[in-house]
Image (cartoon, grey):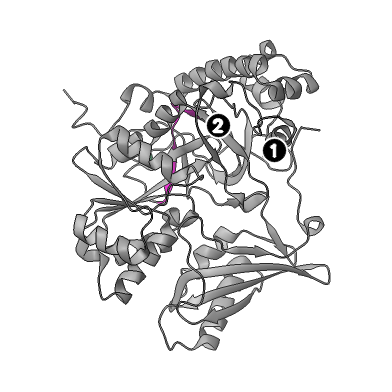
Amino acid sequence: MTTLETSRLWNAPTQTAPRELLDAIHLDKIRHLVGWAYENSPLHRRLYDEAGVRPADIRTWDDYHHKLPFTDKPHYVADQEASADGFGGIARGPETWQQYFHTTGTTGRFLNEAFTHYELHKAGSQYCYGLWDHGVRPSDSMYFCFDFGMWIGLWSFYWGARNLGLTIISGGGATGAQRVRQILERRPTIVCGTPTYLLHLAEVAKREGLDVRDAGVRMLAGGGEAGFSIPATREQLREAWGAEQIYDAYGVGEALFIGQSCAEWGGGVHVVEDVCHSYAVDPASGEPVTGSDAVGEHVLTSYCHFAQPFIKYRTHDLVRIDDAPDHGCGWTWKHMPGTVLGRADFMVTIRGVNVYPTAVENLVGEVPGLSNHYELHISRVDGMDRMLVKVEAGAPGADAADLGAALGRHLRDHLGVRLETEVLDVGALPRYELKTRRIFDTRSESERPIATLGGQA
Ligand SMILES: [Zn+2]
């Protein structure tokens, strides 16, 4: 008999359930949640009333797709600004809340988040599925390159590590050089951080005359940026740390980290279907898109956030969803190859061609002689969008003009449009511990494309 210890499945009964059964369970959960939100959240009641829909009207997938309105960040932000306590979409009172967070402000104003004790317990469980599949067991140890602030991402990774019983080592409040020394001294089996920061730490070590490969780290893990699913960045991380495993997790701050990778498919995540429902829509029409090759906007219903429900919530992340993945991992849960492919509301149109920052990151990583430290500067000149790609050379003394020309050709060959390029000296761009700032958009508010809300008014 397979025991939990020898099985790679954390919760086999649902993780391997047939699609029809999973979909039936999802529909039941969604119907219950819609009723809960209607009764308890003034925001949801108003949105459903405005759409002329009652919870009892949501009986089928067609009802869910076509009758129930989408929710979106601006709904919550407007509700939070009108509320006395500064939170939007609330369905349970502050006496039930255990911890506050807010989403990082890369897309405008903060959205405040409130979670109950139960929800934070569930939040850690999401990581168990993927980490267990990768052979992580209580004898492992995890080092956190993270100052514990208001961004929920790596906090939730910490709860996951606690849930699995790992030995925790906090790198909070330490400099990069101090972290390198702690890692070499403590020899954790897993180091957790954002991909950009983990590459930065490897550089810091070199400057200190040290080598992070001497720490014997088996796995690099984290999320918050696209890098862990980008083949070029995965390879750089593997090389810089000598790590065997690169672990990706995908999250939506409001609804937690709902995507986790299995060990069979590098560069993508399974949807953790115990805690949410995911599907993809055409960003313009709001109609579901199906088929594993179709790119659509990820729409999410979270089952682990009852205090502040997120139901049919537009994430604006562009994804592909494979409904029937066959990796040999045994999971029947949906899979997103490449995790997040771009942002539906952050598309730059250069001379008629849609350019997504993630696509540019992939391509920068493919040009020999360049590092993965880059910035995209977007501006509007004479009514036209322009993008300047600034990137650091991979080594000192490189020929910047030659490298810039090579990058320009590579981008044009793959994107079908010429972008401006500038190659800088090693270390010329700033380094960030958390979400790396790569995009500098100097267009005015009115010059930026507006995300559509599908069927909503
Ligand atoms: Zn898999």
Residue 456 vertical placement versus 442 (above, below):
above
Secondary structure category for the residue under label 1 = helix
- The correct choice, above or below, for 280 with respect to 355 in the image is above
Q: Position of residue 158 (x, y in %)?
A: 36, 41
Front position in the image: 34 or 24:
34
User: What's the amino acid at mark 2?
Assistant: Ala
Horizontal arrangement in the rendering, residue 134 relative to residue 313 (left or right): left
Q: CA distance from mark 1 to mark 2?
A: 13 Å
Q: Residue at 52% of width from left, 86% of height from top?
A: 400
Query: Which residue lies under the disc numbered 2?
Result: 114
What is the span of residues highlighted in magenta in the rendered image? Answer: 267-276
Give the residue number, with chain letter if any, for mark 1.
Answer: 77
Q: Is residue 84 left or right of residue 304?
A: right
Image coords of residue 189 (percent x, y) = 23, 51
Where's residue 115, x and y in %? 51, 29
Name the amino acid type tagged 1. Val
Residue 90's place in the image compared with 232, above or below, is above
Residue ID at (44%, 53%): 229
Question: Image quadrant for the N terminus?
Answer: top left
The mark nearer the N terminus, 1 or 2, is 1
- The answer to which quarter of the image holds residue 426 is bottom left
- Taking the magenta stretch, the answer to whether it contains residue 4 is no
